[in-house]
Amino acid sequence: MTTDTATAQFDIEGMDYEIKNNGLHIIITDFQGDKIDFYPSTGTWIPRGGIKSSGFNNLIRYIKLKTN
């Protein structure tokens, strides 16, 4: 997954994010205001205070389920 691909999908989904370290790290703010650290090169994501997970589609699903 590239940073451009990830951020394009975040834009489509209406998610706020901040790119760090030249795209190696993206901090997503979900719809409840919680932060999620995402690493596009590995697909790893970690909700702040949560458990490490992986997979971009799983990240999008996690954020959407948390909203509902």
Image: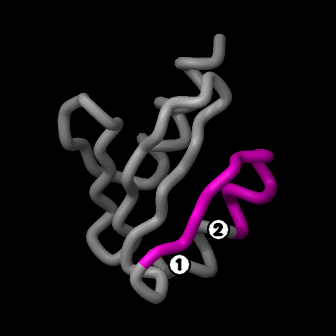
Residue 47, image quadrant: top left
For numbered disc 2, what is the local secondary structure? helix
Q: Which residue is mark 2?
A: 7
Residue 57 placement (x, y as % from top left): 48, 48
* Vertical order, 31 against 58 (above or below): above
Q: Which residues are magenta?
A: 8-20
Residue 10 placement (x, y as % from top left): 68, 56
Is residue 12 shown left or right of residue 61?
Answer: right
* Vertical order, 16 against 42 (above or below): above
Viewport quadrant of the N terminus: bottom left
Residue 61 placement (x, y as % from top left): 52, 33
Q: Which residue is pictured at 37% across the width and 52% down the height? A: 37
Does the magenta-highlighted stretch encompass residue 17? Answer: yes
Q: Nearer the viewer, residue 58 or 17?
A: 17
- For badge 1, the amino acid type reads Thr
Label 1 neighbourhood size at 10 Å, few (<14), some (14-19), many (20+)? some
Is residue 59 shown left or right of residue 14?
Answer: left
